[in-house]
Every structure is written in C-alpha cells, then in structure tokens.
Image (cartoon, rainbow, N blue to C red):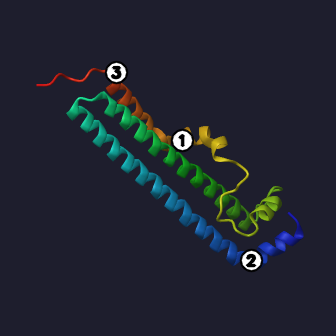
Amino acid sequence: MSINNLDWIKENREYLIKQTEMLQNSISRMATHSLTIKQVGLTVWSAIVGFGFTNRNPALFILAFVSFALFGLLDIYYLYLERKFRDNFNRLARILGGYISEGDDEWMKKMRGNFVKPDPSTKFLGQFLNTLRSWANLPYLITFVITIALLITPLPPNP
C-alpha cells in the first residue's frame, strides 16, 4: 500500500465508514429481494401445480417447472450480487481496520472511490456454478425434484 493511499484513507475515514454502511444496506436489500423471489416463485409454482391437478393437465407441471426455473435464475443473480457487495464490504472493513493487502491499491484505483458498486472483474456467468452451489438454492432443488416426480407419476383418474 502506497503512502498516498494510506494518507487518503486517513483523510477520508468518515467517507469510507459511510460507504460500509451503504454496502450493509445494499446487502440487506439483496437478501430481502432473494427471499421475496423465493416466496413469489413458490406461490406461482404451487398455483400452477394445483391448477394442473385440477385440470389433469401434465403440461401445466412443465409450465410450473419452467416458471420456477426463471425465478431461480433471478434469485441466483441476486445472490451473485449480494456476494459481490459482501466482498466489497469485507475488503473495505479490512482496509479500515488497518489490514491492507497488496491488491488493495489496484482495487481502490479501479473503484475510484465508489465502493458501493460490484467489482466488474468477474462476470455473472463465470460465477454461475459457484452461486448455484449455495445452500440458499435448496428450495429450488427440492421443488424441481417434486415437479419431476409429478411429471413421472400418472395423475389419478377422475372421480
């Protein structure tokens, strides 16, 4: 870390603390949006599956699967963004705590004082599999298994 950056950090400590607070708010919003997407996705999935049972139409189970998969992709994107914001927060907190690493000079130059934006060095598709492996995506896996089971098993006959 260069002397200029150390001086800049000392001079702008309050600004950096405000940036960490803004990052915390962004992380909280991302987590809330992720939960809301799961809730809406499960509601839509259960409504379509229920309608599929009522009409005895297996095509509706496929529609439920596709719609929930689209909600899942949106949720994975929110989880990806949340991780990026957490990375920025952790790095900024480490810098404020005085534990500065070698890559922080470049990172501070790249961010240009705005630490509330995701680091553009990694792309969403490159991190897709890592984000997909998150335990937060377990509801999607369970719902996909249930939908596949519904597609495989025959519907009960009309009474």
Determine which of the numbered discs, if any, sits on residue 12 in the image: 2
Question: Could you tell me which residue is drawn at 41 percent across and 41 percent down?
Answer: 67
Question: Could you tell me which residue is drawn at 57 percent across and 54 percent down?
Answer: 82
* Lower position in the chain sequence, tag 1 or tag 3: 1
- x, y percentage for residue 52? 26, 34
The residues tagged by marks 1 and 3 sit, at their Cα atoms, a distance apart of 27 Å
- x, y percentage for residue 11? 77, 79
Residue designated by label 1? 134
- x, y percentage for residue 116? 64, 65
- Quadrant housing residue 102: bottom right
The residues tagged by marks 2 and 3 sit, at their Cα atoms, a distance apart of 61 Å
- Dot 2: within a 10 Å radius of its alpha carbon, few (fewer than 14), some, or many (20 or more) residues? few
Q: Is residue 55 left or right of residue 125?
A: left
Secondary structure under the numbered disc 1 in the rendered image: loop
> Cβ–Cβ below 8 Å for labels 1 and 2?
no
* Lower position in the chain sequence, tag 2 or tag 3: 2
Determine which of the numbered discs, if any, sits on residue 114 in the image: none
* Lower position in the chain sequence, tag 1 or tag 2: 2
Quarter the C terminus occupies: top left
Q: Is residue 26 above or below residue 73?
A: below
Determine which of the numbered discs, if any, sits on residue 152 in the image: 3
Secondary structure under the numbered disc 3 in the rendered image: helix
Q: Amino acid at mark 2?
A: Asn
In this orientation, which residue lies closer to the viewer: 100 or 32?
32
- x, y percentage for residue 6? 83, 70
Q: Amino acid at mark 3?
A: Ile
Q: Amino acid at mark 1?
A: Ser
